[in-house]
Image: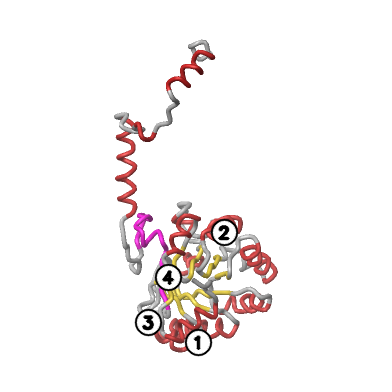
Amino acid sequence: MDKITIHHLHSLKERGEPIVMLTCYDYPTATVLDQCGVDVVLVGDSLGMVVYGFENTLPVTMDMMVLHCQAVRRGVRRAFLIGDMPFMSYQTGTADALRNAGRLLAEGGADAVKLEGGQAVVETVRALVEAGIAVQGHIGLTPQSVSQMGGFRMQGKTVEAARRLIAEARALEQAGVFSLVLESIPAQLADLITRTISIPTLGIGAGPSCDGQVLVTHDLLGLFERFTPRFARRYTELADNMRTAFSAYRDDVHTRAFPAEEHTYRLPDDTWQAILSALDGNGA
């Protein structure tokens, strides 16, 4: 199947065909996502929470993002690969943003980068796009600003907040983002923004009217149990399956049921006797 491109994503919006986007942080998962026809794979800074166990995404570094992008890149052939710009990798100025975004593409193998924010990042987005770097925007609930927002809460609940989000979406589109993540905003507002701008919108807790949907894979699989966002659907309980498997292995080791004969290497008896004789029969 042909490699997914920005042009393909835009054509999906034009045809009204939903875009499928999921996060990924490792090679084995990347290969499966790609085989299943996921359109967009995001190496999200959410790895700070679901992989490293941090309380939020703020401790994630550029080196961490580059390393995980490299792993996912090896497993992705068809999907469009986006790398998240971590906290303080672009807020400190255009030069830093260009250098760090360049690392995600040149070292990490990403096709594009994603950064959070509205009006405050418009000039940064414009500089990245002018440098030839594809950028995905992200507005609404922006986890890197969670302390300022007072927690993981729905955004856009007032006239003023709705007006601001619409303005941010338009400003980011004009600055050159190729798509826009809408997180934790009312479905009606997400629908209005999706119909207002010409680029694809990807919703996460933003209702069914977006041009596509994105979830954190660990939420979908039931692997991250600290909390489950209201907007996340758990399609399986993989953590339960893992506990069952790990416990069965523990029991088999304790009872010496594992390894069984089929899991064991053995030399022919005559070969072993020759080795044993050479060792004087005592392993010396």
Q: Compare marks 1 and 2 and give the one earlier in the sequence.
A: 2
- Disc 3 and disc 4 in contact, CB within 8 angstroms: no
Q: Amino acid at mark 3?
A: Ser
The amino acid at mark 4 is: Val
Instruction: Please rate how many residues cluster around mark 2, counting C-alpha atoms within 10 Å: few if below 14, some from 14 to 19, many from 20.
Output: many
Question: In the image, residue 283 lies at what x, y percent?
Answer: 50, 15
Q: Which residues are magenta?
A: 212-228
Mark 2 → mark 4, Cα distance in angstroms: 19 Å
- Taking 175 as reference, is 253 left or right? left
Looking at the image, residue 209 lies above or below residue 95? below
Question: Mark 1 highlights which residue?
Answer: 198
Residue 174 figure quarter: bottom right
What residue is disc 3 on?
A: 209
Mark 1 and 2 residues: CB-CB less than 8 Å, in contact?
A: no
Looking at the picture, tell me which residue is in the foreground, 1 or 116.
1
Residue under label 2: 65
The crowding category of the residue bearing disc 4, from other C-alpha atoms within 10 Å (few below 14, some 14 to 19, many at least 20), is: many
Dot 1 falls on a residue whose secondary structure is loop
Observer-nearest of 103 and 252: 252
**Which class describes the residues within 10 Å of circle 1: few (<14), some (14-19), or many (20+)?**
some
* Residue linked to disc 4: 214
Tell me the CA gap for discs 3 and 4: 13 Å
Give the image location of residue 247, x and y in percent.
Answer: 31, 40
Query: Vertical placement of 95 versus 281: above or below?
Result: below
Asked if the residue under mark 4 is in contact with the one under mark 2, i.e. CB atoms within 8 Å, the reply is: no
For the residue marked with disc 1, what is the amino acid?
Answer: Ser
- Which residue occupies the extreme front position in the image? 270
Under tag 3, what secondary structure? loop
Whole-number angstrom distance, CA of label 1 to CA of label 2? 30 Å
Judge by depth and name the residue closer to the eye, 57 or 208: 208
